[in-house]
Amino acid sequence: MRGPADMAELLPYLLGFFPDDSIVAVGLQGADLQQGGVIRVDIPEAPADWPRAAAETAALLVRLSEQRDHRPEQVLLYLCRDPEEGEARPVLGTLGPLAEALRTAFEAKGVGVKESLCVSGGRWWSFLCRREGCCEPSGNPVQQARGPGPVVAAATFAGLAPRGSRKAIAAGLAPLGEPAAGPQRLAIEQALRHRPLTGGEAARERAGELLDEVMAEFLAGAREVDERRTALLLLGLQDKLLRDRAAEYAESAELGAAQRLWRFLARRCVIPFDGYAAAPLTLLAWTSWLAGDLATARVVLGLVLRLDPDYLLAQLLHESLNGGLAPELLLEGVRAERARRAAAVNRTPRSGSGAGERRPRTGRRTLPGPLTAPQTPYDEEGAPPGPDEGREPGPVPGRSVRAGRPEAPGPLLPGPLLPVPLLPGRRLSARTRAAVRRRRRATEALPGPGSGLRAWGGAGHRCGARGTAARS
């Protein structure tokens, strides 16, 4: 990077999406200031919480950097918030105290702030600029008229491409709004009234058969399910064993269809049944991760953990993704369980034979591998618009008010984001499970270094050096 202009332009490529209402911190390591870890944290709504958020952000980045590689020498900071009424300048003034709190917090940790930017409404400003006449009051455009800079060109050449904004990804998964929500709400209510008082293995098997039936339709190109079967699937997926069985649709030939189905089901979790979305959204995050769409997986897992902070499978996937684990480690256990279940079905005696033998259970037991523990809004490239196209969305997942109570605030930041040992046959200790539950839902951490990205050299602020000097 040659200066703040490159820094602003590169932001969505660092995360894989355009952050909003976010603090982003990029650690710089070594004498050549190579990129280390990157974290993204929600900006707390209450300014009174900003000093604590700043202190915890600094502590988190330093702790993660020390765990994975080296302590950062300096840090790049972004404060991202779009204006509400089309004017970006007030955002700069509003977030000024937060920028100062972050600078103070990092310097208290012995980490200097190389640059601190406000990114808002497609423009950027530097919080460090003190030279009169250096920066335009209206800010500098993030997208240059001359086209992408060399840093963005290099990122694009490397195959990096932002997936849109975090808000846009979340909005694409919002529950259906009225009037489309009415028929689905009625179908869920009817399914609840007719649900057996006791479920058990037989009910799980019926739900599993329905899941296989609908997935076969989606593999053949279907893009929607009738309200009755949708309601039955949503109720069935609240059973964690059936949800784990659904996670077995994880092979490359199945991912596109699975993503369409999980997205479809998540949007049918209409108010007041929006809490049912945790299961299909977690499955959506899982298949997105397998498909290489880490940005969507991170955003969707954040939605799940706002809906249900104690949803353990989402917590474990979030920890694994943040810890830099490859999804193939989890996929091995899923494949083994799928093979075991298929073998059990094949051993089932035919009608009229094996009298007196007990029929093997075809329902799922708890996975012995990575998914032991009680999510993309994008389909495969070139797929036609789905049935939700043009429909009015409901509230964004995680933002609804249920039972008359707003979402309870959690801690601003998690404890250390250590990779969770999700290996076949291993169980998490009670201490580890408790630590996982304490993690904050609104934090993403990307491992580093290794990108080859370096900050510009020299000391001091250089707003005016719009990419003329310095190494990239």
Image (cartoon, helix red, strand yellow):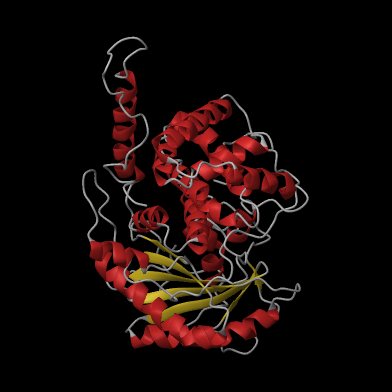
Residue 12 appears at what percent x and percent y? 54, 59
Between 331 and 66, the residue placed more toward the observer is: 331
Quarter of the rendering occupied by the C terminus: bottom left
- Report the residue at 56% width, 89% height from top: 130
Is residue 248 toward the left or the right of residue 228 in the image? Answer: left
Is residue 258 visible to us here?
yes
Q: Residue furthest right?
A: 179
Q: Residue at x 29, y 19 (%)?
A: 347
**Residue 205 quadrant:** top left
Which one is in front, 170 or 139? 170
- Please tell me whether residue 30 is drawn above or below residue 248 in the rendered image: below
As displayed, is residue 184 above or below residue 458? Answer: above
Percent coordinates x, y for residue 435 in the rendering: 30, 67
Asked if residue 283 is positioned above or below residue 428 in the image, the reply reads above
Residue displayed at 60% across by 65% down = 402
Q: Is residue 390 left or right of residue 61?
A: right
Name the outermost residue toward the top.
352
Q: Is residue 345 above or below residue 202?
A: above
Left or right: residue 297 versus residue 438 is: right
- Name which residue lies at 60% across and 54% down: 273
Figure quadrant of residue 344: top left
Foreground residue among 6 and 402: 402
Residue 345 rendering spot, x and y as whole percentages: 34, 23
Q: Position of residue 430 (x, y in %)?
A: 24, 62
Between 21 and 117, the one lying in front of the other is 21
Q: Is residue 154 visible?
A: no
